[in-house]
């Protein structure tokens, strides 16, 4: 009776509504190899059920293909995302002629362990808290008179702002650093990328954690 009622006034609307429900199509199909439902008694009713089932299957496949396309698209966008999209653009820097005491005070105030050393907007080195300890204090240098230029690391690991996230991950793992300077192609400092930035933008939630593990590992334990 239900099917005959559907063939009545609701004939035009019913197929469109029911085909929008893959669950309904699955109910119609039943188990593989089974005949049409028992209420489909005439040839016309069985043909209608078969066509409706085919439409439901097409809808299910279309929805799955859409989900796959969306997932691939998101992964592709993340892989091609440039570092300028995730970097912190406002960078605290210090001049090479400042003293180590001034640098240490700035690190304490900002709660950071490294500072880019710049002349204008040109990056010429990096100063870390370890540089202050090993290259100055351990050598008996007076931090109130020793300049940053004397203790900084002039060989800088960096990436360009038009490079991808994976490039930054590789550099941070290779040099075991937690903060990476980002430069333009004409070598102007325009931002910094941290492990926290990577955590927000990583392809998988574990990528930043894996990078941190590689950064913290002793050289002999790194992969």
Image: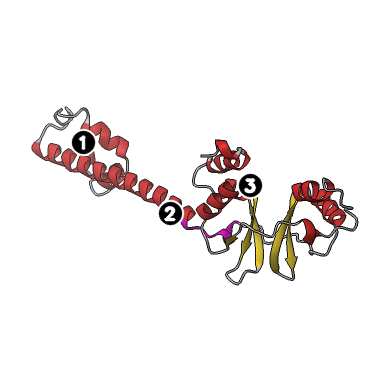
Against 108, residue 2 (above or below) is above
Magenta-drawn segment:
80-86
Q: Residues within 10 Å of mark 3 (few under 14, many from 20)?
A: some
Q: Of residues 30 and 219, which is closer to you in this image?
A: 219
Left or right, residue 150 beside residue 222: right
For the residues labelled 1 and 2, the Cα–Cα distance comes to 47 Å
User: Which residue carries the number 2 mark?
Assistant: 76
Q: Of residues 163 and 175, which is closer to you in this image?
A: 175
User: Which residue carries the number 1 mark?
Assistant: 3
Write the residue at 61% across / 46% down: 176
Left or right, residue 155 beside residue 101: left
Q: Which mark is residue 99?
A: none
Q: Of residues 16 and 220, which is closer to you in this image?
A: 220
- Mark 1 touching mark 3, by CB under 8 A? no
Residue 153 spot, x, y in % from top left: 71, 56
In this picture the colour scheme is: secondary structure
Q: Earlier in the sequence, mark 1 or mark 2?
A: 1
Q: Earlier in the sequence, mark 1 or mark 3?
A: 1
Against 92, residue 140 (above or below) is above
User: Which residue carries the number 3 mark?
Assistant: 196
Residue 76 spot, x, y in % from top left: 43, 54
């Amino acid at each position: 009776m239900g099917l005959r009622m559907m063939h009545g006034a609701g004939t035009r609307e019913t197929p469109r509504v029911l085909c929008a429900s893959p669950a309904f199509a699955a109910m119609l199909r039943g188990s593989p190899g089974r005949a049409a439902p028992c209420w489909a008694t005439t040839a016309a009713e069985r043909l209608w059920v078969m066509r409706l089932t085919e439409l439901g299957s097409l809808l299910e496949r279309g929805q799955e293909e859409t989900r796959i396309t969306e997932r691939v698209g998101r992964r592709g966008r993340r892989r091609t995302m440039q570092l300028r999209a995730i970097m912190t653009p406002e960078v605290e820097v210090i001049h090479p002629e400042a003293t180590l005491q001034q640098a240490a005070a700035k690190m304490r105030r900002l709660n950071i362990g490294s500072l880019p050393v710049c002349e204008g907007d040109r990056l010429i080195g990096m100063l870390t808290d370890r540089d202050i300890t090993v290259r100055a204090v351990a050598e008996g240098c007076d931090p109130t008179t020793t300049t940053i230029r004397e203790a900084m690391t002039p060989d800088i690991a960096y990436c360009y702002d038009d490079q991808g996230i994976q490039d930054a991950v590789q550099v941070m793992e290779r040099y075991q650093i937690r903060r990476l300077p980002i430069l333009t192609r004409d070598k102007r400092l325009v931002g910094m990328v941290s492990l926290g930035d990577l955590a927000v933008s990583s392809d998988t939630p574990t990528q930043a954690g894996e990078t941190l593990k590689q950064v913290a590992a002793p050289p002999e334990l790194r992969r």
